[in-house]
Image (cartoon, rainbow, N blue to C red):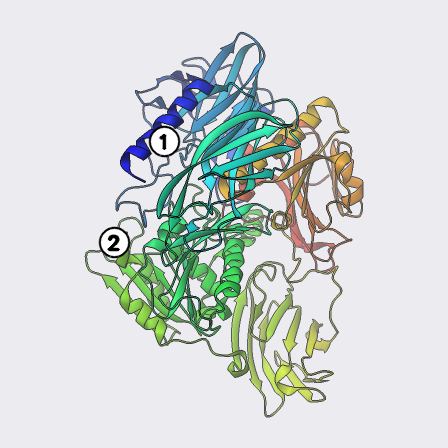
């Protein structure tokens, strides 16, 4: 787009916003340093939230104490010319990851330090009314006691509808340096194009039905049904019907548009018009970019994780889309868009490069749903380009360097070689806004909870790198991710690895140009590496901590563990001529072995762990055998039923969020109980949108049915007395929560200040689980507010019960936590108990 066209577009946007909005900036308030701990773990502490939840928080005044501590006092703060409120002693800190493609070395793409501080502001309203709250640089905000998501990375696109009371309205903003404003639109239902997900228009391709996604803001008191979005680009129009948007919420919605009228490379203007029953509600311009068919481009797809629209980027190879070429899979760094990652590479003459998104430029550190995004895009790339399966390579920079270490160790059979660039291996040694995973627990309870993060520790999975050619690239002057991380891995590899190349770029900072990733020797290293075919891989050494994340390597599958989420290892050898499999196992209850090399009717001998050998005769050409360890002896047992734990459904509280989850809030409780349930569902949906570029259906308990929401994960908010879907989904669960009581098996805990997170399999499905965010009363419900489960690599067990006092006592406030056994029964040996009655 020419510069004057861009100028006209910006002016049009500003005029539209000025006409549609009035803005109130919070330019003064009170601030205090509050003891708080929010990180990559289930435990969190927050002294201010504690006093707020137990209704013991005095109204802030300058010099006044916060809660019960005389040493923590409120101090006045005044905004600067940019409307940033900042504590006098607050230092501006990097809240995000390091720079990468498109971000200058030594800088960060936004983010303000937010650890351990609150800012209190107020607004006096002449009447009850709704407004949009925009806060930047915070991790959360309480509006008249109701918690909402924060804009931790200072992205600026998070607009939250809030209800203002007549008179005083109070805002507790978690963050030490923030900007905050209230906005009023001329229409309560608007469209926002600031955070659009859009594909590239590839010239000479079919562009009649491309898919994008934008945000609809519903600041009205009713759920909007039947919204339509009309797009107009170069006189080509298209109308899409949008999903429902709940009252007082935002939702990112997919839409279709016709870009076939675009015939030239560059940026082009378009318009979206939002209507309801033929009435125009809002209209906004947006920009779409057209590229030549040989240029790097963005493509969108519908994610199976939550049904939202995501994108990936491609740098096409010079050989076109001919099948059988190589595939280079490149994972980006923090703050870097996937399209920027792809554009850092020159086209290769022997393969195509594909860059997934991690769902956001920071997202989930390539773990959790970032990991699932990578797997989705890898499957799409293989279908689209049909590469040679023996020539698929993994690389990435910075946070993507961590992603390379993590995805390489987690799925070692998917790659012919890996190349981490300027990366850190584990979040135990390097963190960002969500901090570090603690290295160890000081108590049995802390150790139990940290065990749930074991899969993230690639140092413990290091033997998985053995078959992978590995090229390590790092600048020796890197101050963001110091070169000591590369040297750590070089030293580790020196003890066992025989196929590693290592290079420190002289004088290289964290980003020293495109050669930080597009390094010729790296790709030459890839060129002479090929993945060994399964039929030729006769030796296996594989470790996993969670079969629900990674269970299989080649012809062996760790089906079940003896101790959930502790490390499991198999070391196996296969002798095809002799018809034998031998080896050893650690923490493996059930093992599945694929027996294709022997065909039908061959008797195979299996000897593991120095126990008596067992025999099995193959029943088909593609037979598998399931063997189980029973009293230190392996036995052939047959395939387990789908109810049992296994690779498809293995537990932990985070698992229900993997399969198009639906949030179910309560309507059968008291007014305050139901209000908490709905507000908590909205808070989690806001956080998921911000962190995961996604959207979640939020429904009332009376709307839920097994038929309508079959094969979708479910997250219930409430307890057995308040949520009518509880009986339908959790009746048989050994964890039960109602008013003033929690039962976990035979154990009973009482009181109104208990909270619980737990999961349970849906019996009508072979893969769906239900999650419950629960409490025994308003104090317990409030204690469950924090959603650290969305922090990348944070670990949660199958169930945990904690009191509101955890917010000031830490791990000693957790009453019990643990894992079900493989039959989904409470296992005392896999539980830690600190308090029961």
The residue at the point 59 percent across, 50 percent down is 305
Q: Nearer the viewer, residue 132 or 648?
A: 132
Residue projecting furthest to the bottom: 577
Residue 112 pos. (x, y %): 37, 33
Residue 345 pos. (x, y %): 32, 59
Q: Is residue 661 left or right of residue 364?
A: right
Residue projecting furthest to the top: 126
340 lies above or below 354? above
Whether residue 321 is visible to the viewer of this picture, yes or no, is yes
Q: Is residue 336 left or right of residue 692?
A: left
Residue 489 pos. (x, y %): 36, 64
Q: Which mark is residue 9?
A: 1
Q: Secondary structure at mark 2?
A: loop
Q: In this figure, which residue is indicated by the disc labeled 2?
A: 513
Residue projecting furthest to the left: 507
In the rendered image, which quarter contains the N terminus? top left
206 lies above or below 274? below
In the rendered image, which quarter contains the C terminus? top right
Q: Secondary structure at mark 1?
A: helix
């Amino acid at each position: 787009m020419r510069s004057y066209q861009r100028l006209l577009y910006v002016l049009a946007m500003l005029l539209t916003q000025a006409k549609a909005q009035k803005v109130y900036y919070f330019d003064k308030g009170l601030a205090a340093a509050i003891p708080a701990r929010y990180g990559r773990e289930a435990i969190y502490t927050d002294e201010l939230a504690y006093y707020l939840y137990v209704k013991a928080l005095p109204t802030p005044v300058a010099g006044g104490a916060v809660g019960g501590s005389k040493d923590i006092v409120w101090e006045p703060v005044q905004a600067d010319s940019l409307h940033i409120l900042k504590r006098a002693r607050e230092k501006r800190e990097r809240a995000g990851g390091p720079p990468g493609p498109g971000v200058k070395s030594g800088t960060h793409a936004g983010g303000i330090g937010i650890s351990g501080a609150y800012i209190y502001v107020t607004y006096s309203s002449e009447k009850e009314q709704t407004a949009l709250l925009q806060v930047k640089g915070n991790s959360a905000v309480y509006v008249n006691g109701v918690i909402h998501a924060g804009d931790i990375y200072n992205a600026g696109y998070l607009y939250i509808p809030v209800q203002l009371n007549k008179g005083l309205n109070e805002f507790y903003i978690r963050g030490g340096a923030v900007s905050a404003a209230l906005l009023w639109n001329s229409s309560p239902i608007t469209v926002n194009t600031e955070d659009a997900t859009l594909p590239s228009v590839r010239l000479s391709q079919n562009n009649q039905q491309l898919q994008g996604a934008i945000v609809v803001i519903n600041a009205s008191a009713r759920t909007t049904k039947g919204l339509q979005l009309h797009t107009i680009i170069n006189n080509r129009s298209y109308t899409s019907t949008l999903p429902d948007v709940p009252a007082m919420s935002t939702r990112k919605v997919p839409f279709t548009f016709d870009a076939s009228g675009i015939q030239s490379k560059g940026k082009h203007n378009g318009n979206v018009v939002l209507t309801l029953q033929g009435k125009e509600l809002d209209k906004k311009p947006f920009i779409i970019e057209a590229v030549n068919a040989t240029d790097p481009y963005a493509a969108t797809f519908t994610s199976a994780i939550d049904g939202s629209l995501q994108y990936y980027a491609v740098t096409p190879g010079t050989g076109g889309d001919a099948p059988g070429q190589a595939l280079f899979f490149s994972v980006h760094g923090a703050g870097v868009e996937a399209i920027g990652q792809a554009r850092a590479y020159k086209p290769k003459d022997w393969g195509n490069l594909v860059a997934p998104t991690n769902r956001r430029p920071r997202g989930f550190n390539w773990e959790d749903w970032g990991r699932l995004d990578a797997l989705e895009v890898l499957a799409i790339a293989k279908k689209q380009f049909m590469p040679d399966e023996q020539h698929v390579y993994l690389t990435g920079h910075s946070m993507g360097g961590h992603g390379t270490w993590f995805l390489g160790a987690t799925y070692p059979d998917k790659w012919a070689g890996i190349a981490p660039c300027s990366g850190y291996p584990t979040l135990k040694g390097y963190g960002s806004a969500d901090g570090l995973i603690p290295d160890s627990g000081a108590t049995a309870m802390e150790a139990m909870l940290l065990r749930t993060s074991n899969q993230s520790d690639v140092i413990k999975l290091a033997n998985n790198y053995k078959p992978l050619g590995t090229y390590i690239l790092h600048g020796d002057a890197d101050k963001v991710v110091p070169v000591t991380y590369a040297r750590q891995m070089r030293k580790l590899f020196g003890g066992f690895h025989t196929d590693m190349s290592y290079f420190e770029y002289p004088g290289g900072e964290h980003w020293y140009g495109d050669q930080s990733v597009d390094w010729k020797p790296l790709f030459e290293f890839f060129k002479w590496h090929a993945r060994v075919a399964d039929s030729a891989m006769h030796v296996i050494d594989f470790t996993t901590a969670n079969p629900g994340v990674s269970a299989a390597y080649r012809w062996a599958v760790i089906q079940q563990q003896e101790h959930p989420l502790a490390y499991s290892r198999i070391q196996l050898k296969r002798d095809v001529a002799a018809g034998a499999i031998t080896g050893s196992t650690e923490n493996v209850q059930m093992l599945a072995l694929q027996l294709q090399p022997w065909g039908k009717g061959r008797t195979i001998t299996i000897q593991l762990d120095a126990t008596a050998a067992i025999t099995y005769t193959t029943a088909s050409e593609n037979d598998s055998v399931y063997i189980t360890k029973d009293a230190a002896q392996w036995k052939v047992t047959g395939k387990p039923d789908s109810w049992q734990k296994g690779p498809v459904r293995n537990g932990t509280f985070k698992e229900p969020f993997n399969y198009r989850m639906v949030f179910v809030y309560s309507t059968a409780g008291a007014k305050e109980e139901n209000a908490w349930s709905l507000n908590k569902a909205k808070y989690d949906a806001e956080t998921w949108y911000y962190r995961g570029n996604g959207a979640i259906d939020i429904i009332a308990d009376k709307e839920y049915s097994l038929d309508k929401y079959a094969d979708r994960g479910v997250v219930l908010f409430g307890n057995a007395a308040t949520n009518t879907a509880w009986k339908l989904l959790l009746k048989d669960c050994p964890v039960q929560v109602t008013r003033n009581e929690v039962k976990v098996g035979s154990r009973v805990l009482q009181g109104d200040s208990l909270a619980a997170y737990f999961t349970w399999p849906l019996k009508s499905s072979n893969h769906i689980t239900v999650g419950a965010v629960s409490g025994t009363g308003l104090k317990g419900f409030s204690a469950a507010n924090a959603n650290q489960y969305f922090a990348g690599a944070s670990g949660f067990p199958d169930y945990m019960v904690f009191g509101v006092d955890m917010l000031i006592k830490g791990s000693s406030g957790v009453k019990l936590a643990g894992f079900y056994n493989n039959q989904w029964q409470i296992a005392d040996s896999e539980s830690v108990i600190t308090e029961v009655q």
